[in-house]
Image: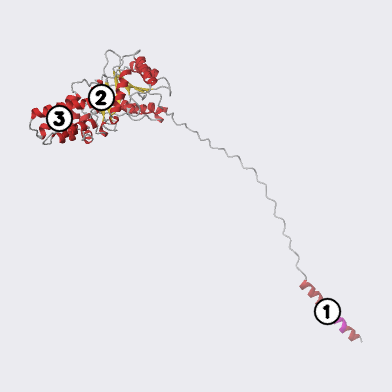
Amino acid sequence: MDGYIGIIAIIIVVILLGIGTTALLVRPRSKTTLPPPPAPTPQAPAPPVEEEVVETVAPPAVPVEELVKPPEVEVPPPSAGRMVRLRARLARSQTTLGRGLLELLSRDRLDDDVWDEIEETLITADVGVAPTRAMVEDLKTKVKVLGSRTPSEVRALLRAELLTQIDPGLDRTLHTSAPGERPAVLLVVGVNGTGKTTTTGKLARSLIGDGKTVVLGAADTFRAAAADQLQTWGDRVGAPVVRGPEAGDPASVAFDAVARGIADKADVVIVDTAGRLHTKTGLMDELGKVKRVIEKKAQVDEVLLVLDATTGQNGMRQAQVFGEVVNITGIALTKLDGTAKGGIVISVQRELGVPVKLVGLGEGPDDLAPFDPEVFVDALLGD
């Protein structure tokens, strides 16, 4: 009995040991708690960094004149010989008047039909009706006297006749020298679109090329671009330009320009006036006022009427009306290289008794030339 109880007790102890061991094996692991991170060690504040003081050196002051550089002043060529240099350009556009007449006059038989063609050729070239009739009558007489007509004889005959009509004896000198200490005063007039302001600028350039000092007056205050255009021409050759407010009094600007010319001891003052329609009486009267106001300061030595050679007989009417308002002393004929109607040289001189003094033979700055009748006629007839 006691042995049985002992066995039971051993079995119970083994069971209890097994249960305990199992409980230890299956017991869940407890979560491991990490210790809190150590508190950051307080750091001493960084010493302030001293900013490096950079001394700014201001650039040297630059004058405004150097920041806005004026255009380089050009040295124009002299006016002498310009028309000779431009002769080929003129000849290319004048075949109707010159070579057309040569061909007609060289025909074996000059009957009435041929003379009618000659007359038509002259009228088409804007020679004008009265000068045309005079030329035809003279040519008829000379042909009868001449008898035989070789090409060289016909050319000489026609050359002499054209020169007679153009009249080489007229004084074509520009009045750019005044007596005493005052400058010569030139007034440039004409209608819109004839190249009046451009002619004024080119004329100033030509005179400076001849060694003269020039002051420009921008008295065309009705067209805003006119004063700017003239300013550009003046800046290119170093000629001062006297301007006024837009729509201001043109007579006042003209007066100031002459005063500036006297003060600067300039050789020439050129005043560009507004391009007026010859049909507007009020504007024409104002042109007369401009001339009268200038004459309170100095005499007007030259009044140049700018005509467009392509306008033909309409240009003649313009010339007549301007001649009634101011005393025209010379004609500047523009765009002569772009027309076959060179006969206007003859008609305008015959109607006004005023010589053509200047001709425009292109759009270049030096394409304005003193008019030379012999060079002109030779260009018409060709070599």
**On the rendered structure, is 125 left or right of 274?**
left
Residue 15 tag number: 1
Q: Nearer the viewer, mark 1 or mark 2?
A: 2
How far apart are labels 1 and 2 at the CA level?
A: 151 Å
**Image location of residue 134, percent across then percent down:** 18, 25
* Residue on which the image places disc 2: 348
* Residue 8 among those drawn in magenta: yes
**On the rendered structure, is 152 left or right of 236?**
left
Residues at discs 1 and 3 in contact (Cβ within 8 Å): no
**Quadrant location of the N terminus in the rendered image:** bottom right
Of all residues, the one furthest to the right in this rendering is 1
Q: How is the image coloured?
A: secondary structure
* Residue on which the image places disc 3: 158
* Mark with earlier residue (1, 2): 1
**Image location of residue 382, percent across then percent down:** 17, 34
Taking depth in this image into account, of 220 and 140 the one nearest to the observer is 140
Three-letter residue code for mark 1 = Ile
Element type where label 1 sits in the image: helix
The quarter of the displayed image where residue 363 is located: top left
Dominant secondary structure of the magenta stretch?
helix
Residues in magenta, as a range: 7-15
Residues at discs 1 and 2 in contact (Cβ within 8 Å): no
* Mark with earlier residue (3, 2): 3
For label 3, count other residues whose C-alpha is less than 10 Å away and answer few (under 14), some (14-19) or many (20+): many
Three-letter residue code for mark 2 = Val
**Quadrant location of the C terminus in the rendered image:** top left
**Image location of residue 358, percent across then percent down:** 25, 25
Taking depth in this image into account, of 15 and 5 the one nearest to the observer is 15
Taking depth in this image into account, of 298 and 317 the one nearest to the observer is 317
